[in-house]
Structure formats: C-alpha cells, structure tokens
C-alpha cells in the first residue's frame, strides 16, 4: 500500500514537472516565433493572422525563401484552414509537393512507393508514386474548386530518402541536400 502511494506521488510530481517544463518552453519560444512571423515576407504579403508556431512550419520557411528569391511559385492557402500548414505551392500548373518523406524504393518493381505510417486505427497504405501524385492533385483541385494543377513534382531532401542514388533517376522528385532554393530555381528555369 505504501509502495502504491509512493508510486502515485512520484507520478504526480513527474506530471507536474513535465507540465512546468512544457509551459516554460511555450512562454520562451512562442514570442520568438511570433516576432519571426511578424517580420517575415509571408506576413508582409498576406497579413494573415498568426497561429501557434507558424514560423516553425516548413511551408513558412519555403514560402519566405521563394519570395526572397523572386521565384514565380505561388502559395495557395487551403480555403477552409487558417494555418499555413494547409496550403500548396504551384508553379504554372505544376503542384510542388513538400513535406513528403514517406517514400521507399521498391527494388522488385523498380518503382518508388509512398507509404503511410500504420497505427492501430489506420491501415498501412502503400501507393505507387503515380497514384500518390494523382491523389494529391485531385485533393488540391477539389479543395480549391478549380483546376489549379494538372501535374506534380515532389520536393524532397535527399537525407529523407533511403537509396537516394535511385531517387535522382526519378523525374518527379526535386531532390536537394542543402540547396533547396537552387533546386527550385533550376526547376523553374527548365519547366
């Protein structure tokens, strides 16, 4: 009985400690994120209201780099979402898919496949790259209510790929290491 009470007490103390650390992190990190957001090209161009940790989002970073380098790539916000997380980059009629890192090379078929993380409630889904791209294009066009894109490429960091040497052969991947903007500049020139 005493062991049970001691375990509960230490569990309670641990929970409070974790909550305090989380709160302190929020208190210190949120103002920096907010200031970074308010001084960004994204905010200057859109005047969209800040949502938590927008300046830490990949879309935010990519948007600012694209605009800083005057690339003719548009960012289209999801019409039903406020956060910058939900939106797409489009060059002419080509969707540029970012944040996709669940690609694996299937050596048997010689093709790249997209796989979702499986958990207890969801099934593990595997799509070939063609199906994945079609699904993304359809989702964007449906959400916008217009045909804003009819093809797509996937902007992906080589560090997120196993067998990256095979990925360079895949024409629908825009692969970069530390040179994402250079890769996008090259893509815009050649399209």
Image: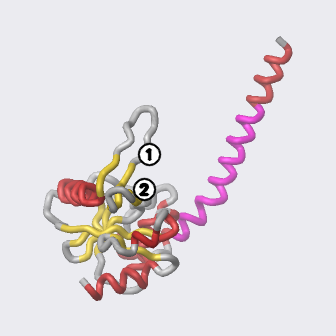
The residue at which mark 1 appears reads as 117
Of the numbered discs in the image, which one, if any, rests on residue 102? 2
- Spot the residue most to the bottom: 189
Indicate whether 117 appears above or below 5: below
Could you say which is closer to the camera, residue 34 or residue 4? Answer: 4
Instruction: Identify the residue at image location x=30%, y=70%.
Output: 172
Residue 158 in view of the camera: yes
On screen, residue 29 versus residue 165, left or right, reads: right
Horizontal side, residue 28 vs residue 3: left or right: left
* Residue at image point 50% right, 76% down: 177
Image coords of residue 22 (percent x, y): 66, 47
User: Toward the viewer: 68 or 177?
Assistant: 177
Please state the horizontal and vertical placement of residue 153, each as a whole percent of the image.
30, 69
Residue at the extreme top of the image, as rendered: 1
Q: Are marks 2 and 1 in contact (CB under 8 Å)?
A: yes
Secondary structure of residue under mark 1: loop
Q: Position of residue 79 (x, y in %)?
A: 26, 56
Residue lying at the far right in this picture: please name it. Answer: 2
Who is closer to the viewer here, 175 or 113? Answer: 113
Q: Which residues are magenta?
A: 13-36
* Among the 4 quarters of the image, the one containing residue 100: bottom left
Is residue 28 within the magenta segment?
Answer: yes
Say how many tags the image has: 2
Q: Distance between the Cα atoms at labels 2 and 1?
A: 8 Å
Snapshot quadrant of residue 7: top right
Chief secondary structure of the magenta span?
helix
In the picture, residue 106 is in which quadrant?
bottom left
Q: Mark 2 packing: few (<14 Cα in 10 Å), some, or many (20+)?
A: few
Is residue 43 among what the camera can see? no
On the rendered image, what quadrant is the N terminus found in? top right
């Amino acid at each position: 009985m005493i062991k049970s009470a001691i375990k509960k007490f230490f569990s309670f103390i641990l929970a409070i400690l974790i909550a305090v650390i989380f709160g302190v992190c929020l208190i210190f990190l949120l103002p920096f994120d907010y200031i970074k957001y308010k001084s960004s090209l994204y905010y200057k161009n859109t005047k969209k209201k800040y949502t938590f940790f927008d300046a830490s989002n990949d879309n935010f970073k990519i948007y600012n780099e694209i605009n800083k380098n005057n690339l003719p790539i548009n960012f289209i916000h999801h019409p039903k979402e406020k956060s910058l997380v939900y939106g797409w980059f489009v060059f002419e009629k080509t969707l540029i898919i970012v944040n996709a890192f669940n690609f694996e090379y299937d050596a048997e078929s010689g093709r790249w496949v997209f796989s979702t993380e499986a958990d207890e409630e969801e099934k593990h889904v595997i799509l070939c790259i063609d199906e994945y791209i079609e699904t993304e294009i359809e989702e964007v066009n449906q959400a916008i209510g217009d045909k804003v894109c009819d093809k797509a490429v996937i902007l992906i960091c080589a560090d997120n790929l196993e067998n990256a040497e095979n990925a360079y052969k895949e024409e629908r991947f825009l692969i970069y290491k530390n040179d994402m903007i250079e890769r996008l500049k090259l893509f815009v020139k050649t399209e």
